[in-house]
């Protein structure tokens, strides 16, 4: 973990040099699909028709938000006053995070640091390509993430034109 932090800090410090690379992930992406596989079972954490955006800025910040559009509205119509069941559905069916990211000399995603998240356990986490990859092919990007608990998450993104 310490080595990952040092590598990430070094890459962030080298930001101006990295800015000269072709940065393949920079831009705005919309979610196409999301699956999680654990113990041979495949689930759809944000539903079968997920919604969301992922933005990678040229100055190496990112913001990601995903949700299941089938999450029922909160009956009280007041944020923070949902029932336990409503709150569980919201937490299970939506996710947001932001932070900083790096690319290598070829412009390929090489890691990120989470600065804020709707799941507080992930704040300050550093992810290298060991846990998280972003593979760009044309206007499609595949995000593969190995959760600490063992599940593998695959998200397909499409670049906004």
Image (tube, rainbow, N blue to C red):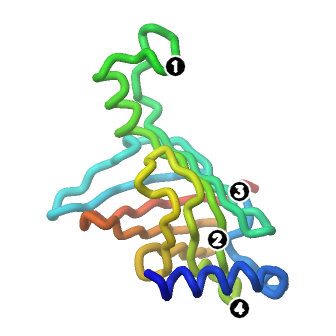
Q: Residues within 10 Å of mark 3 (few under 14, many from 20)?
A: some
| Closer to the camera in the image, 77 or 140 | 77
Label 1 vs 2, first from the N-terminus: 1
Residue occupying the far left of the picture: 39
Label 3 vs 4, first from the N-terminus: 3
- How far apart are the two marked residues, 2 and 4, measured between alpha carbons? 14 Å
Residue on which disc 2 sits = 101
Residue 71 in the image: state x and y as whole percent.
41, 28
Residue on which disc 4 sits = 105
Q: Quadrant of the C terminus?
A: bottom right
Residue on which disc 1 sits = 79
Q: Residue at x 27, y 50 (%)?
A: 43
Instruction: Say whether residue 38 is left or right of residue 25.
Output: left
Q: Secondary structure at mark 1?
A: loop
| Closer to the camera in the image, 133 or 44 | 133
- How far apart are the two marked residues, 1 and 2, measured between alpha carbons? 31 Å
Instruction: Say whether residue 153 is left or right of residue 126.
Output: left
Label 2 vs 3, first from the N-terminus: 3
Residue 28: numbered disc? 3
């Amino acid at each position: 973990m310490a080595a990952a932090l040092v590598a990430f800090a070094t890459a962030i410090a080298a930001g101006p040099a990295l800015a000269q690379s072709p940065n393949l992930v920079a831009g705005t992406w919309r979610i196409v699909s999301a699956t999680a596989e654990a113990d041979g079972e495949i689930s759809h954490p944000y539903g079968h028709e997920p919604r969301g955006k992922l933005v990678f800025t040229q100055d190496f910040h990112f913001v990601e938000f995903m949700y299941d559009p089938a999450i029922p509205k909160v009956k009280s119509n007041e944020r923070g006053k949902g029932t336990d069941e409503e709150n569980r559905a919201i937490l299970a069916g939506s996710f947001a995070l932001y932070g900083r990211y790096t690319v290598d000399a070829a412009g390929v995603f090489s890691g990120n640091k989470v600065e804020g998240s709707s799941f507080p356990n992930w704040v300050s986490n550093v992810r290298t390509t060991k846990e998280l990859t972003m593979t760009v092919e044309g206007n499609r990007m595949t995000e593969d993430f190995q959760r600490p608990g063992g599940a593998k998450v695959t998200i397909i993104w499409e670049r906004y034109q």
